[in-house]
Amino acid sequence: MKTFNHYSTFFLFAFFHLISFALFSQNKSEPICGTITTNENLELFKEIKPAIETYQSLFLSSKTTTSKSNTIAKNYIPIKVHVIRTSNGTGGISEHDIENTIQNLNIMFSAAYLEFFLCNGINFIDNDDFYKFKTSKEKSLVEANNVLNVINIYFADYIENSSDESICGYTYNKPNYDVIFMQNGCATNDSSLAHEIGHFFSLIHTHGADNKGVTKELVNGNNCSSTGDQICDTPADPKLTNQNINNFCRYIGTETDANGDLYTPDTSNIMSYSMKGCRSHFSEQQLARMYAYFITTKNYLTCGDSSDIDDIAEESNTSDALDFKIYPNPISGDIIYVKPSNKTETYIFEISNLMGQVFESGTISNQPIYVDHLASGTYLMTIKNNDSKIIKRIIK
């Protein structure tokens, strides 16, 4: 019995040591966030605050009512992925990692009623000049590759800012400038890309806009709406680092606010500077703010342009060019029906995943489409004729 207890203690110690080492290594090896919340950003947020608060209230009230009239609809956000590789086409983030990254985003943002999908495939940029990316080269890269009205995410092997610091990623809050830059290694850690998309949808670091000083937000929350991250259900944060968080994601700092109260920050918040492996969630008000910011400021995001319109829609929505009823959706068995309003036209369909991998295709008829071979998940159904096409989301 003593021997058994001895080995049990040893394995428990080794297990927790491994977890601790993994978290510590992850935090030490990853570079910083390069997004800067400027005074112009803060002025913009102040200007649109009344509209933001209206939709935040709608969002939060929808969580406490069972009325269908107050149900929030899901919003589909197009992403254009740009993969930077060497001039000979080697390197770059893998398509498998991109798919996993988008799936992780959809888990992270589902409670904000935001779902991301890949728009019109991947753009591969084979250029040694951008492979080890410096932010000073952003203009030339973006001007040659950006797609309008989608979130353009550029994945680079390495990113360095103007101060020669390695950064994990960065983005902006500029009207109609929809770009995010991500270092490949950070994109796959399950929190850094979500962190940058949080910035894209107006979230500020939980320690506030100033990365150099200690937050002015009080622990008692009296000034929570005007300072710090301006969100009241995220505790005041003195700025988390690997010096004030232990390897078990616990805050061990001794900083106090202007009242002398000890900070008790949330070390698991996505928008904090906590260890990357500790960050796992957005607060309810952060979710509400991102939803409201999309509705008021980024609702123009759509996949396609005037020459190639992709109507990403719920099953009950219609396009000017095509009108279909798809049922049942979500799919309850192994078949799905597609019924066009114009039965004299000939239509073809494709069922693909969010990465564009096609699993089923054919011509629309009165017969059911068998989908028993599809795994559970979210898919895109593309339906088109000679003139138009529409993309609708189906769930199995």
Image: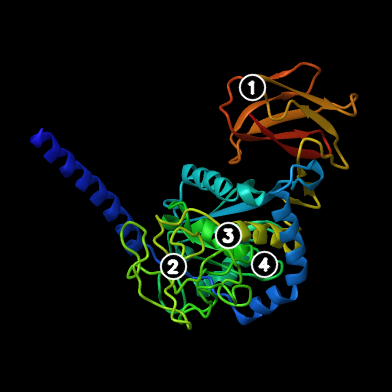
Measure the alpha-carbon separation of dots 1 and 4. Answer: 39 Å
Residue ranking furthest to the left: 3
Q: Mark 1 = which residue?
A: 371
Q: x%, y% of residue 369? A: 71, 20
Quadrant where the C terminus sits is top right
Query: Whole-percent x and y of residue 121?
Result: 61, 45
Q: Position of residue 12 (x, y in %)?
A: 22, 44
Q: Which residue is mark 4?
A: 177
Q: CA distance from mark 2 to mark 4?
A: 36 Å
Residue that mark 3 sits on:
197
Q: Is residue 196 visible?
A: yes
The answer to whether marks 2 and 3 mark residues whose Cβ atoms lie closer than 8 Å is no
Between disc 2 and disc 3, the foreground one is 2
Mark 2 lies on a secondary structure that is: loop
Label 2: how many Cα within 10 Å (few below 14, some 14–19, many 20+)? some
**Residue 179 in the image, given as x and y percentages of width and height:** 61, 63
Q: Rounded to the nearest whole Å, what is the CA distance between mark 2 and mark 1?
A: 50 Å
The residue under the point 52% across, 43% down is 99
Query: Along the horizontal axis of the image, is 319 left or right of 207?
Result: right
Placement of 71 over or under 154, stated as above or below: above
Residue 86 visible in the shown view: no
Q: Can you tell which mark lies on residue 264?
A: 2
Element assignment for label 3: helix
Confirm or deny contact between disc 3 and disc 1 (CB under 8 A): no
Left or right of residue 227: residue 311: right
Q: Closer to the camera, 230 or 2?
A: 2
Give the mark nearest the N terminus, 2 or 3: 3
